[in-house]
Image (cartoon, rainbow, N blue to C red):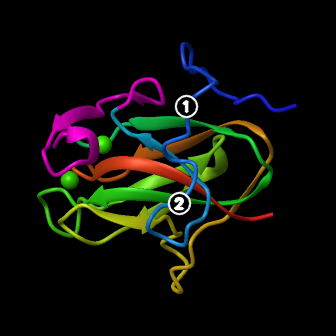
Amino acid sequence: MLICGCSLEGLSVAWDTSSSSSGGGDGGYPRIRAEAEDDMKCELSGRFERVEDPLASGGQYVAVPDVGCNNDRVDCVFQVSEAGTYRIRARVAEGPAKGVDNSFWISVDDKPEPAIRYDFTGADFHEDYVSDEKDETGTPLKFALDPGAHVVTFGCREDGSKLDWVELVRIGP
Ligand SMILES: [Ca+2]
Ligand SMILES: [Ca+2]
């Protein structure tokens, strides 16, 4: 019995995940993808905006413009069908201010509290597993998820940081 513990109304719980639930270029693990700009899957709050960019998947990414962060967040809902251990994979790019537009606050179902700081590097869009900045080994974060709806949150930590899409990747039981 899992409720998503959030208030995301109007989001379908019966997504078509057929196009993204298997395969992929990274290990072939089963995965579910949500484009950050897709309002059927991800809810933007605060000052997150959709930005047109031909280099972004789907032609858009989301970011907070250069106005500072104020609890702005992207909440993506994933309908998990199989219990297991999951990683978060994302396609991201640094914003215009090199080295200071490249992090987010990460949580799943609003845990942990406070959220985990995720740093990344690279001005071009690239795929990356989300890790904890405090973990020097860079080991991707793992989450044990039961079947049901789960909310993966990318919170604004440095404005300008670009988020293209988010995936939940099932790496094992
Ligand atoms: Ca910034
Ligand atoms: Ca996108």
Position of the N terminus, as image quadrant, is top right
Q: Position of residue 156 (x, y in %)?
A: 37, 45
Q: Is residue 134 left or right of residue 108?
A: left
Q: Amino acid at mark 1?
A: Asp
Q: Residues within 10 Å of mark 2 (few under 14, many from 20)?
A: few
Who's the residue at 23% across and 64% down the image? 100
The residue at the point 79 percent across, 41 percent down is: 147
Image disc number at residue 16: 1
Residue 25, image quadrant: bottom left
Up-down relation of residue 141 to residue 51 (above or below) = below
Residues in magenta, as a range: 38-67
First reached walking from the N terminus: tag 1 or tag 2: 1
Residue that label 2 marks: 23
Q: Closest to the observer: 8 or 32? A: 32
> At which x and y percent is residue 152?
56, 44
Residue type, numbered disc 2: Gly
Q: Secondary structure at mark 2?
A: loop
At 80% across and 50% down in the image, what residue appears?
83
Image spot of residue 173 (x, y percent): 81, 63
- Is 43 in the magenta? yes
Q: Could you tell me if residue 62 is visible in this image?
A: no
